[in-house]
Structures are given as structure tokens and as C-alpha cells.
Image: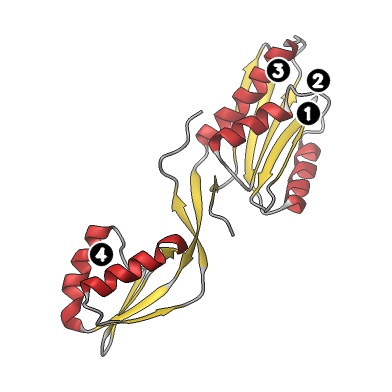
Amino acid sequence: MQNYRTVLKPIETETVIKKSRFIARVHPVRDEAEVGEILTAVKKEHYKATHVCSAYILNTVPEKKKASDDGEPSGTAGRPILDVIERKKLKNVLVLVIRYFGGIKLGASGLVRAYAGAAAEVLSAATLIDKTLCDTPKVIIDYPQYGALSNKLTEWGTPPAGETFEDKVTLSFEIPTTETEAFHQKLIDTLSGRLDWSLDEQIVVDKPAHDLPTE
């Protein structure tokens, strides 16, 4: 799995431009099958809508992405939506913009601005998370080592995911796989090699997104 940024949960926003309603929705998705299910459900819900335009990007190798104008002039709806997703550097995301025509034509450039703007608005309103593949090391130490190590963990910004106090202290962690080796070496240096280290299964951890990409 490649680490990627996505949305935490579905969200919807709405904009009115020259009497046309643009309802934008974003959904986290796992695969093309889920994309199809959501599109089917939304088109059924909004069966009176003039257009249901969409775009998605999946975290696959190679990357899968697709845009749909759903009857709007070619390149005026799906592609602008897809461009916004790409600028946000998001994966496993489906964005739909549902249009109820209000009787006033917007022209090609107006449509591009409307669909891109609706997509940008809903993604700005969404909570973004980083899906990070993590190792789950367990570290066993003696009680006299615990205080000094706790201070270091606070300094490093790496709190344990769990702590067990029995004959010895067992600490469990969730460490991004790219950082595991360096973290292990810091523990060895701090504890002068006096620790038991083991790796359990890898997991995917949701972390709050920071340093968000700009438009």
C-alpha cells in the first residue's frame, strides 16, 4: 500500500449560480465497484437533476482515475472536478457535482468555473486524513528505564499506543514503516541496547492531515 491522503467521511455543499443549483458531494471510496454503487444511488436520489458529473482517483498502481461530464459539453465538468482532486493530492476519493439547470446558460468557461468551484468548496469543507502504513513494534524494558524513555518519547513526539506494566514494562507503538528503522536505532541509543524489540503485523492508521496542499 502507498500512503495517501483522503477524506474522513462524506460531506455535501451547495452553490447557486445564475439560478442553477450545484450540489457537490465527496465520498471516500475503496474501489471502482464502490464508485459505481454511489453513482447509481445518487442518480436515483437526484433523478430530476439535469446532470450528475463526477471524477475519482484511486490509490492503485498504476493510479486509476476517471472523469464524467454526464452530458455537459466535453471537458467543462468532469475534468475541472478531477483537476481539483489532483491539486489537493487526494486518493480514494469520489467527487460528484449535481446540477439542476436554472434556465440561464453559463457558457463553457462559466461551466468550468462552476464545476471546479463546487468541487473546491466541498473539498475545503471536508476533513482530510492521511492513511499511513505503520509497523507495530513492541518494546519490553525494565522499570528503571521507563522514566528516562518516557521523557525521550515525549521529546520525539512518539507516544506509545499502549503500555502494560507487569514484571517488566511493555510499550506498543504505531510507527510509519519509513521511520521504523530510525526509531529502533534511537531506542537502542537511548537504552544502550538494553531492550527487547519485536514487530507485529502492519496496520493502516488514520492520522490528521497537516501541511495541506494549496489550490
Q: To which quarter of the image does residue 179 belong?
A: bottom left
Asked whether, in this view, residue 172 is left or right of residue 169, the answer is: right
**Which residue is outermost to the right?**
71
Kind of residue indicated by mark 4: Leu
Query: Label 4 to label 1, Cα distance in Å?
Result: 51 Å
Quickly name the residue at label 4.
153
Quickly name the residue at label 2.
73
* Label 4: element kind: helix
Q: Are marks 1 and 2 in contact (CB under 8 Å)?
A: yes
Residue in the foreground of this view, choosing between 113 and 62: 62
Vertical placement of 111 versus 25: above or below? above
Dot 3 or dot 2: first in sequence order is 2
Instruction: Characterize the local packing of mark 2: few (<14), some (14-19) or many (20 or more) Cα atoms within 10 angstroms.
Output: few
Query: Label 1 to label 2, Cα distance in Å?
Result: 7 Å
Query: Label 3 to label 1, Cα distance in Å?
Result: 11 Å
Specify whether residue 12 is in view.
no
Quickly name the residue at label 1.
69
